[in-house]
Image (tube, grey):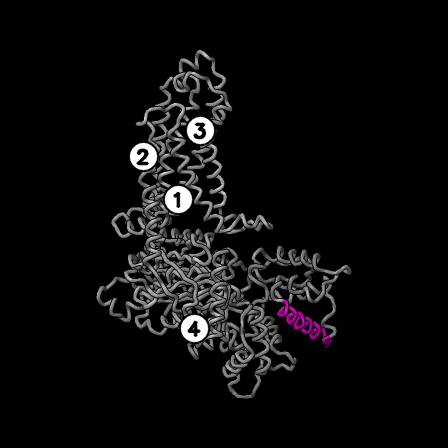
Amino acid sequence: MPAGKDEISSGSGSVPGEIPRADEQEVAAKSFEGSHEQPLVDQPGFVELVIDSESSGSAMARSNARVMPVVEDEDASAARNNVNSALEGLRFIDKRTASAGDEAVWHRVMERFEKLSSSDGKLPPGRFGACIGMPESEEFAAELLGVLRRRRAHSRGVTTSAVEDRHDIGKDELWDLWMDLTDKTTASRMQIFFDLCDRDRDGKISGSELKSAILLSASANRLSILDEQAEEYAALLMEELDREKKGEVGISQLESLLSKRAFEADSFRQHYQSHHPCNAERLGRLQFLACSTKNAFQEDWRRLWIVGVWFGAMAVLFMWKSMQYSYRSGFEVMGYCVSMAKGAAETLKLNMALILFPVCRNTITWLRSTRLGSVIPFDDSISFHKTVAGAICLGVLIHGGAHLTCDFPRIANAESKTFMRTLGRDFHGCQPSMLGMVMSVEGVTGIAMVILMAVSFLLATNLARKNRLKLRRPFDKLTGFNVFWYSHHLFAIVYALLIVHSTLLFLTHKWSEKTTWLYILVPTVLYIGERFLRVSRACVYKVDIVQAAIFPGNVLSLHMTKPPGFKYQSGMYIFIQCPSISPFEWHPFSITSAPGDEHLSVHVRSLGDWTEEIMRTFAKEIEAQGEDSGDEGALRRFPKLYIDGPYGAAAQDYRKYDVMLLVGLGIGATPFISILRDMLNTQTGKPEYQQSPRRCPSHAYFYWVTKEQGSFQWFKGVMNEVAEMDHKAVIEMHNYLTCVHEEGDARSALITLVQALHHAKSGVDIVSGTRVRTHFARPNWNKVFARLAANHPGARVGVFYCGMASAAKELEGIAWTFSQRTSTRFEFRKESF
């Protein structure tokens, strides 16, 4: 492990608060926010060289690693899969804790020391973990403290007792302990790790001690490992380490297994320099800018032309209506105020019509299958819906503001003769007061619309819709998805008021000039028609629940019969209604079954009030059926469900690409499970797939990132099925568990090693219980994209993502960057319902 800024070198004459800076710098590529997995050497074409114990005499003599340029060959590639490359090196301080530099990290430790210490200025041993940055690993930190104290005592020729290990920690002792923890030498780190395993301090590690160390490591990483499993894994390690069958191993055996490192070469730099079209070093500044602009346009031209046409239409309507009123007699009294108000009103007519189109899901699903699907970005329909809503807010502000602050006061305060000459006919020869205009039908309907829209818009924000406000009772009932869903239906009243408001205008009397109804007629009829279609399909698409199960992480798996004539594609989603919970609410869920499967399946995670209620409802029935499994009518006790759909989503277009990168966070893996099953069914040649051959991408890379070990149970069967039946090796699956400390952290060292050995021997991952190997921490997305660009030059790669919005922005940025800098075209597609 090379010395880096996350480790503090011990130097002579060092005192607390004065820390020598490390000579080597850590070069880390950013991954997701809070990402653990940031490689120390992330420069293309370079690797970390670790001298093997067999060639150096003893790995204990190694103190520093060297970074050398290498060229990847077949041996290096094969070495990647060697189980001895499971660890990147031992580290006792989290990379995130040490990311700010040696001095800053130590000052943070001292700040925590001051906060956590007792009145006597000393730190209780139980708070040692929180002080050094391990607040979630108290048990591990306690063991580490004992090892470090015994190590210090041994260096002074003093023996320690268990009682002495429990005395409080002063500042000077904390500095000494910190120096040991951050020692860069391999010998020091190896000895500390060995002592953590050597419980009886006899210089040897037995099978029972390995078992205890594995359980300690599992606890520090929030993994569920049973006592019997720990015993099995300890025996596996002993089999690998104790080749002489002595029943115990020394530090040399453990060291030889931990210290072997495979070369990790990356030839992306050569590929980048020679293949990417916009090479800043090869092109001049202007040429590079032109090339990047061209590529950016190629990526976003569909969004650009839609937004351009929309803005252009609003600008033309605003200017046309403004100029029209500037030539009317009332302009003498109201001036440009009336032009602004009427111009904004004309854009409002357009946007009140457009805002309905993105939520006409049946229409959009049908249009996806036409040629329009290649020129209109239907994936962004909900984003466009929100953008139009923002334009409506701005239009209302300009329209209402101009009337209330300018037009109405000028009319009320105009000279009588001027008013009668210019506006007398519009107001039937009676000059109104300010209050009279506000309290008129036109004024009241306008104010009522503003109030209803404001309520609907506020309750549609993420803070309210996702219940992030955390209001106290009884105000907590004013947020959540249910409130958002019901408040959005206030727009039915808004549209009725809009018709009244636009019919009884102060300054417009000809029917031909009252055009609001022309704008909203088609979208309103279309939207109402879709609502009736949903009701009718709910009566036709009757489903029966054939299987229901609840998995760890509050996930409900539902398998139901397929309604007659129900056809869908992988990546689509359906709406589900449970009348026993609410006869009005419909909620979207990705279909996790493939079109060729016998049953229709969805996975529901409890994240809101409706999903929590359906989880409780099915949990009661599942428990009741478990108690009465012999009842033939037991299956009929499941709650009745109605479905509506299917509806199109971004993932259904996966066949258009040469290569797929599927990224799911937590329950966001659901739309991609259907795709994996579909590709597998295509390979195995099911009858329905043979009748209509389908084009599939040449390769699919599936990355599933989750923070809970139990999540892997959701799709355990699918992952094993893919691993066993993907004979053409076109599907590559990667599981990432973020609750486990990154590979190289001492807290996960034994887990990583056991995992590698167990997977190599049995083909089963100990963390997920599947044939898919689980990685720890989060993926390094720069490396993932670089690998795909190197393996698939010139290919069109569809990057499909479902998960948190913050991660979507990062992935989209990386996809755009690699599209600019390589010949591979990465097209980012985000799932949104």
Which residue is denoted by mark 1 in the rendering? 385
Q: Which stretch is magenta?
A: 138-162
Q: Is residue 281 left or right of residue 487?
A: left
Magenta stretch, main secondary structure class: helix
Where is residue 829 shown, x and y percent of the image?
Answer: 37, 53
Which residue is denoted by mark 2 in the rendering? 518
**Residue that lies at the very extreme toward the bottom in this rendered image:** 245
Which circle, 3 or 1, is nearer the viewer? 3
Residue 288 within the segment the image draws in magenta: no
The amino acid at mark 1 is His
Which circle, 2 or 1, is nearer the viewer? 2
Query: Of helix, strand and loop, which one carries label 2?
Result: helix
225 relative to 505, above or below: below
- Ranked by sequence position, the earlier of labels 3 and 1 is 1
The amino acid at mark 4 is Thr
Which residue is denoted by mark 3 in the rendering? 441
Where is residue 259 shown, x and y percent of the image?
Answer: 51, 73
Q: Which of these two is toward me, 676 or 287?
A: 676
Q: Is residue 55 left or right of residue 156?
A: left
- Ranked by sequence position, the earlier of labels 3 and 4 is 3
* Spatial separation of the CA atoms under disc 3 and disc 4: 67 Å
Where is residue 462 shown, x and y percent of the image?
Answer: 49, 48
Q: Is residue 498 left or right of residue 373?
A: right
- Residue 222's tag is none
The amino acid at mark 2 is Leu
Q: Are marks 3 and 1 in contact (CB under 8 Å)?
A: no
The crowd level at tag 4 (other Cα within 10 Å; few <14, some 14-19, many 20+) is: many
Identify which residue is drawn at 28% across, 60% down: 565
* Spatial separation of the CA atoms under disc 2 and disc 4: 59 Å
